[in-house]
Amino acid sequence: MQRNLYRLNDREGCQKGVFMKKRLLAGLAATGLIVSMIPVNLVAAQEQTTLEIWDMFTDGSLAAAQEAIIAKFEEENPNIKIERVPKDQATLEETLKAAFMAGDAPDIVYLEAGIGSAGTYVQAGYYEDLTEVYEEYGWKDTLMSACWEIPSADNFIWGVGNEMETMGLYVNQDIFDELGLDQPQTVEELTEDMQIIKDAGYQVLANTLDSQWYNNMNFLTTIFYAFMPQEDIDDVMNNDGSWDKESVRAAVECVIDWLDKGYFPSHPEVDGDQENMFFSGDAAIWITGNWSVGAVNEHPDIHTSIYPFPGSETCSDGGSQANFTGGAYLVYSGSEVKETAYQFIDFSVNNPDTATIWAETGGTMPPYTEEYEADLSPAGEAIVEYLGDDSLQNTAGLNMWLGTNAFEFFSKAGQNLAIGALDVDSFISEADAAREMDIQSGLTKGSFKVN
């Protein structure tokens, strides 16, 4: 399939060469110096630049995509050698801190780049400001805006986002057809459908609100953004505004209502296999992201439809869509090969050939918005279609914006709602208390300052 959302701004490059005039060569030959120059030039021609990259792709399709892109880059740039070191996220974060302190960090880091994850390292001067690099390579013209909106604050851009991820409504279409249900247009309509599904004897949701931070954060983001107009989202995320808003209260009330009515699995606070619950055929709905497209493709026996998550009747702009970047390229400020690092990042994210690799081999949506070809499954095509729908909001998820304390609160908030440890008022008060602590530490979009 092809995508053609924006116009590509071509950039012309040039190769530098060394040209020796015949007269100079003749003079050197006469003095015998040309003999000594030959091996010097051969050494220069063979000289290589080494670029070290640490990433989170320890195995699977994303690791295969990264390896394919590196191989292609080295083929086109034989004077550059990539040393890739894959690590799981926890190990990468732990060893990276030590590497920064020792002044021996890799040239490029591929890691979560929200302000809560990267902010302290930016303030400590470990990550390079890429603001001018964005201008030089034209990335703001050819990449999705989340690529720089997430890893930035105080006019400082510290990363280039990749792996566009978006939350959606995954439904068992056979169950919907049996019960005469259509694509819900509002959360209120979805809630009515849930009661019909439950009354018919089916499990409604395959979602759990358990100990895993992302099961809390991703779900809550999706519900919040269905009720919060863009001005409310912007106030909380960019201006350090209070969570005490009617839209937020309505979203929390919605989650509590679904819990009280039994739309979640039994004991949703307990860790569960959401994928298995949905593809067993018993659950009708799974609120998840496009990282689950691969699972959809692996279970063709379950007729799955993927829809944008609907907005609410009270959200003036018609609802919203929660987006993430699965990771971002960050450049170590102490790197001695920064220009090479920029060259590789540009090759990886701003290139139709590598966009195809990310989509086909990696199974993820690249941020590249120009035209490229990719052989996608129907599920993948559905994701691309509504990612490019201008009528939907495309707003970074909560985990991409929150400071450390607020991140910790929201990592457990869904689970605490499930066990009754939070109600609407205590949810708001604890969220605001965490926000205040982040403001005091300078780890919010509004308070963040680069030293």
Image (cartoon, helix red, strand yellow):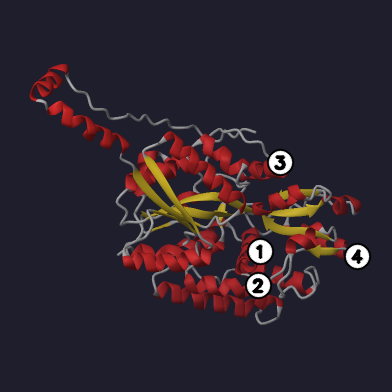
320 or 404, which is in the foreground?
Answer: 404
Callout 2 amino acid: Gly
Answer above or below: position of 182 versus 244: above
Callout 1 amino acid: Phe
281 or 341, which is in the foreground?
Answer: 341
Callout 3 amino acid: Ser
Q: Earlier in the sequence, mark 3 or mark 4?
A: 4
Residue at left offset 64%, top offset 68%: 216
Q: Earlier in the sequence, mark 2 or mark 4?
A: 4
Residue at the spot of label 3: 377
Per the model, the C-alpha gap separating discs 2 and 3 is 32 Å
Q: Position of residue 46 (x, y in %)?
A: 32, 37
Task: Pick the quarter of the image with the N terminus.
Answer: top right
Q: Position of residue 218 (x, y in %)?
A: 62, 62
Residue at the spot of label 1: 219
Callout 4 amino acid: Gly
Per the model, the C-alpha gap separating discs 1 and 3 is 25 Å
Per the model, the C-alpha gap separating discs 4 and 1 is 24 Å
Q: Answer yes or no: do the residues labelled 3 and 4 have beta carbons within 8 Å?
A: no
Q: Position of residue 167 (x, y in %)?
A: 65, 55
Whether residue 349 is visible: no
Q: Is residue 315 left or right of residue 235?
A: right
Residue at the spot of label 4: 201
